[in-house]
Amino acid sequence: MQVASNYIDQILIFSIFALSLNLLLGYMGQVSVAHASFGAVGGYAAGYFALSHGWNVLLGALVGALIAGVVGAAVALPALRLSVEYLILLTLGVSSVLLGLFTTFAQLGGTYGLIGIPPASIFGHQLLQTTDWLVPLAVILAVVFLICHRIGESPYGRVLKGIRDDDKATLSLGKNVVLYKVVVFGITCGLAGLAGGLLAGFNSLATPSQFGFDVSLSIFAMVIFGGTGNLTGSILGAATVVLTKPLLEWAVSLAPETAALWRLTLYGLLLAVLMRLRPQGLLPEGLNVLKPATWRPSRSTNGSDEIVPTAVAAAAQEWETRLEVGESIAQEKQRERNWSDAPVVLEVTNLSKRFGSIVATEELSMVLRKGTITALVGPNGAGKTTVFNLLTGFIAPDQGSVKLNGEELVGMKPNRVANAGMVRSWQDVRVIPRLSSLQNVMLGVQDQTGEHLGPLFGNIPAVRKCEQTVRETAMEWLEFVGMADFANSPAGALSFGQSKLVALARVLATNADVLLLDEPCSGIDTQWVDAMLSLIEKVREQGRTVCIVEHNLHVVDRLADHTYFMELGRITDQGTFQELTNSPRLAEAYFGTV
Amino acid sequence: MLAVTFETVRQLIAAGIVNGSAYGILGVAFALILGVTGRFHYAFGVLYTLAAFFAFTLFDRVGWPFWPAAIVGIVITVVMGVGIEAFVYRPLAARAGSNALLAVFVAALGLGIAGGNLIQIFWGAQTHSLLGISISPINVLGADIINIDLYSVIGGVLLVALLTCLLRFTGLGRAIKATRSNPEMALLIGVDPARIYLVVFAIASFFAGFAAIMAALKYSVEPTMGFRPVVLAFVVAFLGGTAKSPVRVFLTGIGIGLIETISSIWLPVRWTQLVVFVILVLYLISFSVNRAVFTRLSAALTGRA
């Protein structure tokens, strides 16, 4: 019983490690090979306070968790902009520094660590036997699981998955990616600190080797085994890694020392083989053990054929009938109305940007007017996409101003620009492949209650209510673009044309006044172009302001109320499309010398 | 305490260069792999250790003369490095697509863990000596070192010089550089990246094998001998730049070696091991923030101009 409960206790403790790493790695896509060293922060804190201040180890573990959380959030700051290989290296360095610090201080026992930590006690009951630990550890694990589940499988977790698969797209939808990263690093490292404190209390010692680099790697392995993005999987992974040793001792009757070596060898090889055969782990993301319906990977029910879904064509019709009678006359009037009568929504003045000696944009001035479509045309390399990057804060301009309804946008981060009411789409679509079409569009909805930790844990009914509204809004926009039938298909399984429609619905769902659409019709079949064009026209009818970058002059001809012509970072001509096509400049740029 | 004699400093510099050239040679190898193939080759440490163990077994147990044993040890390492790329990393990367780096890292981690423990299972955990070359003291520019130190520094410099010439003056070298900057474009001009990757793994494994034999001669052969030098190689490769010239990476390695030894003048020895990682973390912090700082700085300057 003691032997069995010893292993169960270990599984419970390492499940906490694995769950928290999974939240970081599986949900937010941030690699850390330093997780055990954050456990060391908790473990040493618990041990130190217990030995020198007589604290209860469990209290020390909580304080240690707090310290580890703060250290983790601090580590997140340099980690913000790093790619995977640098993140591996950074966390490896952090692990070495933390463990090195612990071995350096004599007060922490040097290389021997802290030994003889007094037993923990709960409500006056001392936890002396391994069996005494079972219930407290199980309760703590349950709480940790609920915390991780609440964060991961919620509107908050949807943003994390967005960051994991495409942080730029998530940023462009108005999510504060920096804050999410710092908070989640802090929380997960804090939970690792808690697990480390418990481990130190359970073993009555805190040593450097207990939290060494190989322990970090085994926690990493647990998450990979169980399945990244699947919390139940992490517990399964922890059990698998912990139990291989007793299994080897019992089944092959190896000596404990040899069994330890073979255990590591086996799980190392398993890791390599697993990556080849089942990279998603034992329990893939989205699989719920209790719901057999999720056991098979979801496939798009209708298949992602390249033919325009009838729903897309029908959507145009349907909206036609939904609009009141006389709307088409109003539409014509609006068409006729002089573009310059519409009020200015976005005013760009003297925007300049140089990259070294290369002029990307020079003294660029333009206006976008309410309820109109403005086109930005020009040859390849004219700097059209750079203009979108400058307007939305992805690139900081050297000088100039961008005013949205009088509010200065220059200097704002991309997420703040999106919050202010201007959202861009991407030439390369950037839908979040592992989220469903519906979830992609839901990601676009602004001001969600469930995207803040306070209400997420403090006001569950409000979060549920908001989530319901968000789902309905998103579904409406999916219906608008005619993709409602594909609501539950993973966006990665859609055809290019379909994913462009989902991306459009996502941009529309932000409710932004100004939409910057980067080549909305490029790379899709002609039959799709027509559907896309009528959708953009309907967006204009709703009174939104649209700016498109487009190469297809037929598209510009049909959509644009006003056209800017751009060459080498400067706007060299403007007017209606008809006026421009008569200009020799544009003819030369597009068709060669006449 | 600060009364450091010139003698001590000279001795520390010599030791720093000797240690640093070992870090440098491993850093060059790791940077070559990461820069060209994009594989985070964590199993590098195991290959390093294996080279020493094979050479030790052939020399000490089988009774071969030292040099053939050492060369065969290195060749086995090269074959294994190329094999890992061909049979583990490449199929994995092809399958994982955009997640290739993480998938390869996890597999490499698995191989590294498994390999390290297999070595302990087959050879035991104890430390062995590789007495291939009789050690004799030698005086270079007033600093006392041993002959093996001199060989390893000279060997390291030669290898780096050869690699630099290979990259600069031969068709193969240009093909490697083309693959490093853009594999798809390289394919278009008739370079097969898959073959180049194998060549790169062969060169890097050779470097690792050489460094391992030298370390084995100077210190000892033991299962954990690969961990620290290889972690330092990661650091050197990143600090030096994975797409930069081998000379620069090698000099970075020597710099790290010097920092490590010279900091012992002011710091207790147990702290010097940390210094390198503190520098690494600081570097990564600055690497992470400098883009923001630079853009703001250049904006301020051009605004004023």
Image: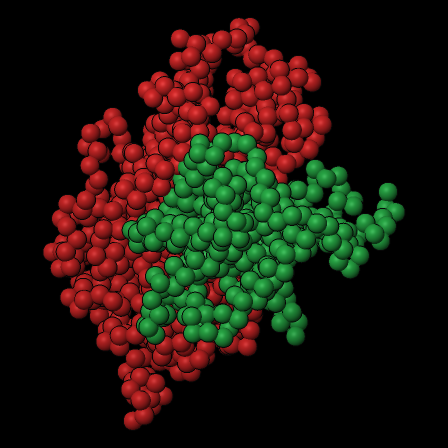
Chain colours: A red, B green
Residue found at the very far top of the displayed protein: A124
The residue sitting at 65% across, 75% down in the picture is: B305
Tell me where residue B236 appears, x and y as whole percent: 58, 54
Tell me where residue A258 appears, x and y as whole percent: 44, 25
Instruction: In this rendered view, identify the residue nearer to me: A511 or A594.
Output: A594
Vertical side of B293 occupied by A470: above or below: above
Residue found at the very far right of the displayed protein: B3
Instruction: In this rendered view, identify the residue nearer to me: A421 or A503.
Output: A503
Tell me where residue B286 appears, x and y as whole percent: 61, 54
Is any part of residue A85 visible from this angle? no
Tell me the quarter of the picture where residue A537 sits.
bottom left
Residue A62 lies left or right of residue B258; in this view the side is: left
The residue sitting at 29% across, 37% down in the picture is: A284
Which quarter of the figure is the N terminus of chain A placed in?
top left
Residue found at the very far bottom of the displayed protein: A594
Is any part of residue A245 visible from this angle? yes
The residue sitting at 69% across, 18% down in the picture is: A52
Vertical side of A134 occupied by B216: above or below: below
Instruction: In this rendered view, identify the residue nearer to me: B232 or B98.
Output: B232
The residue sitting at 47% across, 66% down in the picture is: A390
Instruction: In this rendered view, identify the residue nearer to me: A335 or A109.
Output: A109
Which quarter of the figure is the C terminus of chain A placed in?
bottom left
Residue A557 lies left or right of residue B144; in this view the side is: left
Residue A21 lies left or right of residue A45; in this view the side is: left
Tell me where residue B273 appears, x and y as whole percent: 66, 42
